[in-house]
Image (cartoon, rainbow, N blue to C red):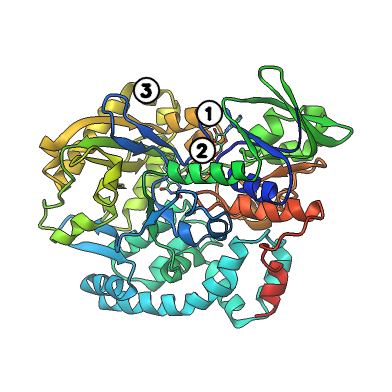
Amino acid sequence: MTYDGIIIGAGHNGLILQAYLCRAGLDVVSIDRCEVSGGGLATIENSRQPGFRHDTHAVFHRALNTMPWYRDLELERRGAEYIEPELNVAMLLEDGRTLEWWTDLDRTAESFARLSAADAATLRRWHDDFVPIAEKILIPEATSPPLPRAQRRTILENSPEGRKLLEVSALSPLQFVRREFEHPAIQAGLLFFNGLREVDMRVEGFGHHIAFLLASPAKAQLCRGGAAQLARALDNAVMEAGGVIRTSTTPKRIIVENGRATGIETTEGEVIRARKFVASSLDPHQTFLELIEKEALPAPWRKMAREFEYNLLAPLFSLNLCLDEAPKYTAAGYPEQIDRAFMVIAGLDHVDQYSEIIRHHEAGTIPPTVMWGTCPTRFDPSQAPDGKHTAFMWEKLPYALNGDPTGWDAIKDMHGEAMLSTWTRYAPNLADAVIDRFTRSPLDVERDFPNMRRGDLLIGAFTNGQIGADRPFAGAGRYRGHIEGLYVCGSSSHPGGNITGLPGYNAAQVVLDDFGIEADWTPPPIASRLTAL
Ligand SMILES: Cc1cc2nc3c(=O)[nH]c(=O)nc-3n(C[C@H](O)[C@H](O)[C@H](O)COP(=O)(O)OP(=O)(O)OC[C@H]3O[C@@H](n4cnc5c(N)ncnc54)[C@H](O)[C@@H]3O)c2cc1C
């Protein structure tokens, strides 16, 4: 078979790229080793408990329905729908108090004020200062192919918003939080969000991330029917535009002829040809080292791919429950409304806990439990049989347990039991409500999706060398992969992982531009937008 283009990996980034290219008239196939497309947009039905559906990967989708591709690809019309609970996040403190993030800033500030009036004022100040920076710089940057680092700095230095951003960015998230906020639980809560986005809180260059979170209108949302509903809507967008999605198809190699990527050979020996391009949404190790023959790629590129780093703190362990009733957080006298919180964080009280968590990750051992999760069926009853519920908790745990990831297979159920007993301390009714449960370890994540190497669900650390135009590494940061006709479009590219769809969206801008195809949806070039500030 011959197509204009082949996309390896039909996760959401691959599908978004494919949908845009097919709508522009290209004939594109995506291939995926799994039986279903969607990657991290995965919803499974419990095989022992029919009717109970679990999202085994991405659940909290940040402001998905405001994404440009969500609108352009008309995903709502194709079956996606989002719920945004008002009490977006609640952090349960040991003493019965809570720290709350609401969709309404005033209510969030009230909650901060119950712990520290000074911190509530700081929250408002950073919110107000950063709203224009988010709107004029950070959001446009995330939705555009990135500028080279030096050019970006030069442009930003010319505007007050740009200078403010550069000044805050120079800090690490930890330095920012310690400098600006006083209450240890508030500091811990803010760094938790930073950690959720997997930015190493110790690394300078990322101090603006927390201010951005404070200013961002983007709140956590739940996909009605489960995350896979978004994947099915994306499938529809691709197929309605004439695209082909081939699941259970694994590439053995990317064919490179006369310095051009011209197709792939599958592990079954089938050859699929590409007239114009091959795009990979996988991690750099698979794309550049495993799928491209050594002779086809210069040694410096192989070296950069080899040295690409994954997040130490990203891997997640999950405990998933089928329940007779939803968790009731009554243990320490939490206010009743906490049961309406979308994301619940438990076990985190003080900023100093992070150093302990990092130490355990470095040693490959299990830290004291800090966990977070939700009960999706409180907001979307369709995910369980009538009157029943699902719930889960995640915990950040090391990939290589005592140096060996396979160690998880022997102890994961035991660890799940320990997590359940901690969870029950906060929500005592769980003691009698559990119908069934299962756990998934960081190794299970990598087994399902080998691109989430070492269980890194963001598919690449955010360090100074791996961001913006240098993500995944210098030379490949604008979605082009050295070999003519080769592109990259997954979470290892700007702006990174999570369900944002932006690597795929930005890659579509580059591919269409390279092939001289005009698209009415592309935003104006980022350099001109930033220069205009
Ligand atoms: C436990 C867990 C919880 C998470 N929770 C959230 C959350 O709440 N919110 C959020 O935004 N994000 C969350 N994430 C992260 C999110 O799932 C990923 O960052 C996101 O899916 C990355 O999207 P992608 O399209 O780049 O890659 P993926 O979704 O990983 O898609 C890549 C695709 O490539 C395929 N593939 C891999 N290797 C090959 C190969 N060799 N050949 C062919 N196909 C291949 C895979 O099968 C997959 O379909 C979570 C992840 C995990 C593991």
The relative height of residue 265 versus residue 82 in the rendered view (above or below) is above
Return the mark for residue 409: 3
First of labels 3, 2 by sequence position: 2
Where in the figure is residue 513, as x and y percent of width and height? Answer: 77, 56
Disc 1: CA contacts within 10 A as few (<14), some (14-19) or many (>=20)? some
- Residue at x 32%, y 52% (from the top left corner): 353
The relative height of residue 124 versus residue 332 in the rendered view (above or below) is below
Name the secondary structure under disc 3: helix
The answer to whether mark 2 is within 8 Å of ligand 1 is yes
First of labels 3, 1 by sequence position: 1
Q: CA distance from mark 3 to mark 1?
A: 22 Å
Return the mark for residue 39: 2
Q: CA distance from mark 3 to mark 2?
A: 22 Å
Return the mark for residue 34: 1
First of labels 2, 1 by sequence position: 1
Q: Are marks 2 and 1 in contact (CB under 8 Å)?
A: yes
The answer to whether mark 1 is within 8 Å of ligand 1 is yes
Foreground mark, 3 or 1, reads: 1
Q: Are marks 3 and 2 in contact (CB under 8 Å)?
A: no
Label 3 is placed on what type of residue? Asp
- Residue at x 18%, y 45% (from the top left corner): 326
Q: CA distance from mark 2 to mark 1?
A: 8 Å
Label 2 is placed on what type of residue? Gly
